[in-house]
Image (cartoon, grey):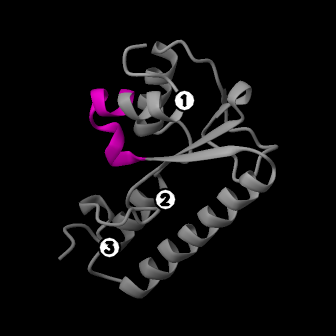
Amino acid sequence: MDTVSPEQRSLNMSRVGRRDTAPELRVRRAAHAMGFRFRLHRRDLPGTPDIVFPRHRLAIFVHGCFWHGHAGCPRAKLPGSNVEFWTLKIDRNRARDQTVLEALKAAGWRSEVIWECETRSGAGLDTRLRSILGMTNSA
């Protein structure tokens, strides 16, 4: 059972940002600390990737586990009320995500998705970024 009114829940959800989210900032900080420079939210690329490494032709999306339906993640649990709405919304988000990744690939770009839950561990995030950016762990 929800502990807030539907109106308050709607207000809370409407205030969830699209840019400069905490997980995105963690990824940006880690990449910058590794010496990488990047561009943010390039609107000329499909899906307006969160972080773009032009030299590597790499686009990174930092997805929220709930909003993008991260399979197997406890953060992706659907609310108990209005299930049909949320199921449809998450399914549409996933379909759009897939279309965007295919469009980037067709344009000659590599793309990666970093999930919100992957940004929780600093060491894990560093390892993931090194893997994505082609660095060895000793670098």
Prevailing secondary structure class for the magenta stretch in the rendered image: helix
Please give the range of residues in magenta: 115-126
Q: Which mark is residue 133?
A: 1
* Residue 11 percent location from the top left of the image: 43, 61
Q: Quadrant of residue 38?
A: top right
Q: What residue is pinned by disc 2?
A: 14
Left or right for 126, reference 108: left
First-in-chain label (1 vs 2): 2
Vertical relation: 93 (above or below) 100: below
* Quadrant housing the N terminus: bottom left
* Residue 50 percent location from the top left of the image: 60, 40
| Identity of the residue drawn at 32% across and 73% down | 78
Vertical relation: 32 (above or below) 102: above
Task: Classify 10 Å Cα crowding around label 1: few (below 14), some (14-19), many (20 and above).
Answer: some
Distance in Å between CA atoms under marks 3 and 2: 17 Å
Distance in Å between CA atoms under marks 3 and 1: 33 Å
Q: Label 3 is placed on what type of residue?
A: Leu
Q: Which mark is residue 78?
A: 3
Q: Secondary structure at mark 2?
A: helix
Distance in Å between CA atoms under marks 1 and 2: 34 Å
122 and 84: which is toward the camera: 122
Q: Label 2 is placed on what type of residue?
A: Ser
* Quadrant housing the C terminus: top left
34 and 68: which is toward the camera: 34
* Residue 81 percent location from the top left of the image: 30, 82
First-in-chain label (3 vs 2): 2
Q: Secondary structure at mark 3?
A: loop
* Residue 56 percent location from the top left of the image: 68, 29
Q: Which mark is residue 105?
A: none
